[in-house]
Image: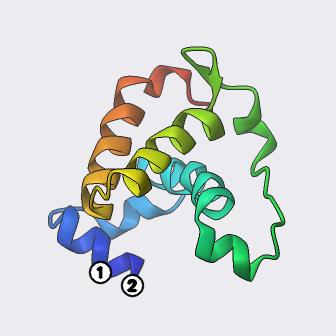
Amino acid sequence: MLQLLIECTFPNYDKKTFNGPHPEWKLSEILVNPIMNINPAIQKILNGKQSSGYKEFQNIKIDGETLNEFFGNIYREHLNEKISFADFLKRTWGEYQQHQDLMID
């Protein structure tokens, strides 16, 4: 399903970039935790267990927020304002590109 969403949202993407160390791969790994930890349906399946993700991402901050907090707030907006998942992906990709210099290689 996610593959289909990505193909529809970014029709010209290169599938090779969804492996490390490409930025697309990094963003996909960063987004796992906010989505898993915030999405009510996923949390129900996980019985409320939270994920912290990659340790190397935990100390990176954008505007004083951890990556989980920063991208989590964008995900909350997506849920609360009923923004399409495609628009969520586009926004997070734009934010990632804007702050790419903070990401670990």
Estimate the x, y position of residue 103 in percent, counting from the top left.
56, 29
Q: In this rendering, is residue 32 above or below 70? A: below
Q: Which of the 4 image quadrants contains residue 72?
A: top right
Say if mark 1 contacts mark 2, CB within 8 Å. Answer: yes
Q: Residue at x 54, y 15 (%)?
A: 63
Instruction: Find the distance from the CA under tag 1 to the CA under tag 2.
Output: 5 Å
Residue 79: where, in percent of width, then height?
42, 57
Q: Is residue 59 something that shows in the picture?
A: yes
Looking at the image, is 102 positioned above or below residue 13?
above
The secondary structure type at the circle numbered 2 is loop
* For residue 19, above or below residue 45: above
Q: Does residue 91 appear to the left or right of 1 in the view shown?
A: left
Q: Where does residue 67 sit, x and y in percent of width and height?
A: 61, 34
Can you say which quadrant of the picture contains the N terminus? bottom left
Report which residue position mark 1 lands on. Answer: 4
Q: The C terminus lies in which quarter of the figure? A: top right
Residue carrying label 2: 1
Q: Amino acid at mark 2?
A: Met
- Tag 2: Cα neighbours inside 10 Å, few (<14), some, or many (≥20)? few
Q: Secondary structure at mark 1?
A: helix
Q: How many marks?
A: 2
Q: Quadrant of residue 40?
A: bottom right
Using residue 14 as the reference point, say whether residue 67 is left or right of it: right
**Image disc number at residue 85:** none
Residue closest to the eye, 43 or 104: 43
Q: Which residue is drawn at the image coordinates 75% and 48% (left, top)?
A: 54
Given the image, on which type of amino acid does mark 1 rest? Answer: Leu
Of 1 and 23, nearer the camera is 1
